[in-house]
Image: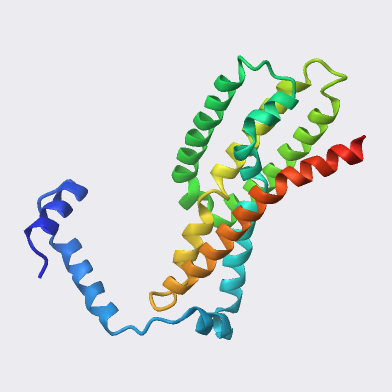
Amino acid sequence: MLGMRPLAAFQVFHGKEDVTKELEEVQAEMKTRKHIRLVSVLELLRRRSARWQVITVIVTMGCYQLCGLNAIWFYTNSIFTEAGINKDHIPYITLSTGATEIIAAIISCLTIDRLGRRSLLISGFGFMALFFGLLTISLHLQSKVFWMPYVSVVSILGVIASFCIGPGGIPFVLTGEMFDQSCRPSAYMIGGTVLWLSNFAVGLLFPFIQVWFKCKHL
């Protein structure tokens, strides 16, 4: 049986005195887990019945990092500087990116069950592509049109909002929902490995990509 400390924690967490049902669910899950044999990463990769689920996790986790948002987070100040934004205004614009992220995350939490994971994921990546296209055009024309730096700022905020509404959290939700308890730890290991390898690749390669594009532009 669970002791008094977990009981008090459950009461505080759920905001009610009677948490008998919740405690019984936890105890039942603990008993079930004792009889479950966890599937290793290699076994999960070899399992044909889980092939498409594994592919989905790998693709969504890879896209989570390779969509380009981390490049914006890592080099926001340099992007704003190259866009021609006044240096005194950059800290305030950077603060607005954080506010945009919070608002978009709240919207995602309120709509994810109503609109569905698939819709938010596809629309999020779709709008990111749109705003990245606008950002590319605005950076290219910033020396010719005086108001293009403002388009760059709006585009960056649009990219961040699009990411947080869909792709920002759904890959992690899908990983937990597509696998049962025996496969879930290995699935998270696969997803986490892809996630951080992609993150490392973006942080390492983005400066070289910038230099390459500058050389091609010249």
Write the residue at 49% across / 44% down.
108
Answer with the quarter of the image where residue 212 lies.
Answer: top right
Quadrant for the N terminus in the image: bottom left
Answer with the quarter of the image where residue 210 lies.
Answer: top right
Write the residue at 71% across / 21% down.
150
Q: Using residue 117 as the reference point, say whether residue 153 is left or right of it.
A: right
The coloring applied to the image is rainbow
Residue 132 percent coordinates (x, y): 73, 39
Residue 70 percent coordinates (x, y): 61, 44
Write the residue at 57% across / 72% down.
54
Number of labels in the image equals 0
* For residue 200, above or below residue 215: below
* For residue 98, above or below residue 90: below
Quadrant for the C terminus in the image: top right
Write the residue at 58% across / 57% down.
118
* For residue 36, above or below residue 114: below
